[in-house]
Amino acid sequence: MAIQTNAEEFRQFFPEVDLIQDASLRQGVIDIWMELAAETSWERFEDIPKNLTHEKHMTLIGHISGVTKQAISMADISEKLHGVTVDRDLLIAACLLHDISKPLESEHDPGGPPSGGSVPPAKKTEFGAKIQHGVYGAHKIWAKNLPRATEIAHLVITHTRASNTRSMSYEAALLFYADWADSDAGIVKGGGAPFAAKWVEEK
Ligand SMILES: [Fe+2]
């Protein structure tokens, strides 16, 4: 099974894609999403959960939309107030692609516990259990030969705590914090402890 979709529907979910100035990067982001739509076992983007724990009620597309919007808002404020320069093409492409592996990490679980929201019951796939988050996104970025592929793959890989590689770039920081802030919105609503509460000082 797969998701029947097209670039027009993608633009309705993520209008920020058109803020990407580089036409081939913009098209590459859309093309990767269309490939994942064909590869997933889900039949609607709206049914894919963001995660399977406290955020299981949160949709993946809602989360990615939240991360992208929050990262852009932070970029606007940082540029205006602090004079920091943000590479918008890099930031927006990375936000839209950072969780692109998630349509393969879960599958519908008829009869499973309810999510507490509009998302149907779901369980982890073999792919989700065996392949580190972020890796497949990087693979897609290189396979599609996206402009600045290594920079974008770097942001996708470093956004997750599953990775032992961190980034020094400000675009990565914006993606990282936007991802945590948006995740915490779903976790708190789901009754869990936010990531912020788990922050511990390194010894
Ligand atoms: Fe995320």
Image (cartoon, rainbow, N blue to C red):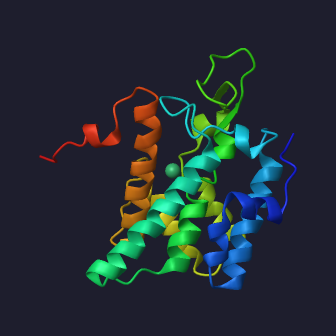
Residue extending farthest to the left is 203
* Quadrant in which the N terminus appears: top right
Q: Is residue 121 visible?
A: yes
In this rendering, the answer to whether 9 lies above or below 79 is above
Percent x, y for residue 37?
A: 79, 51
Q: Is residue 145 visible?
A: no
Percent x, y for residue 97?
A: 60, 61
- Quadrant in the picture for residue 31: bottom right
Residue at (50% x, 72% y) in the render: 91
Percent x, y for residue 155?
A: 47, 66
Percent x, y for residue 172?
A: 41, 67
Relative to the observer, which residue lies in front, 76 or 180? 76
Residue at (88% x, 50% y) in the render: 4
- Quadrant in the picture for residue 124: top right
Relative to the observer, which residue lies in front, 115 or 151? 115
Relative to the observer, which residue lies in front, 106 or 77? 77
Residue at (72% x, 23% y) in the render: 109
In this rendering, the answer to whether 190 lies above or below 39 is above
Left or right, residue 80 beside residue 111: left
Left or right, residue 143 beside residue 81: right
In this rendering, the answer to whether 86 lies above or below 187 is below
In this rendering, the answer to whether 45 lies above or below 53 is below
Left or right, residue 78 beside residue 107: left
Q: How many marks?
A: 0
- Quadrant in the picture for residue 107: top right
